[in-house]
Image (spheres, helix red, strand yellow):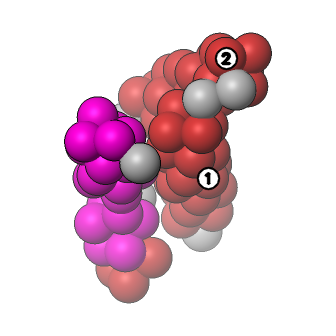
Amino acid sequence: MTGADILGYAAGAVTAFTFLPQVIKTWQSKSAKISLNMFIIAFVNEIMWLVYGIMLNNWVIISTNAVMLIMSGIMIMLKRKYNHQ
């Protein structure tokens, strides 16, 4: 593994967990005072990056964006759940 690979995986890990604090806060507070549109855009963006990573067979891009896709999806579900209560 090269230095570039290590940097890529480290940057990917930090990026992948960008939404984690918001997911935790929303889950705990049961309040989703966030922009649904932002997370829908992020969700679509992650799908495109994931497909791009698959096309390149680049595991840094694939793993980073798979986690981001899950986080964005969770936030969309939480927003829908807590706005309808």
* Residue 7 visible from this viewpoint: yes
Circle 2 sits in a helix, a strand or a loop, which is it? helix
Q: Amino acid at mark 2?
A: Leu
In the image, which disc is placed on residue 41? none
Residues in magenta?
A: 2-25
5 is within the stretch colored magenta: yes
At horizontal 34% and vertical 41% (from top left) the residue drawn is: 2
Callout 1 amino acid:
Ile
* Residue topped by disc 1: 70
Disc 2 vs disc 1: which is toward the camera?
2
- Mark 2 or mark 1: whose residue is earlier in sequence: 2
The image position of residue 75, as x and y in percent, is 51, 53
Q: Is residue 33 left or right of residue 50?
A: left
Residue at image location 60% in from the left, 39% down from the top: 59
Is residue 47 visible to the viewer in this orientation of the structure? no
Please state if 52 lies on the left or on the right of 25 as rendered: right
Residue 56: mark in rendering = 2
Q: Does residue 4 appear to the left or right of 40 in the view shown? A: left
* Mark 1 nearby-residue class (10 Å; few <14, some 14–19, many ≥20): some
In percent of width and height, residue 40 lies at: 56, 29
Marks 2 and 1 sit apart, C-alpha to C-alpha, by 21 Å
Residue sitting nearer the eye, 32 or 15: 15
Question: Residue at coordinates 25% horizontally, 42% vertically from top-left?
Answer: 3
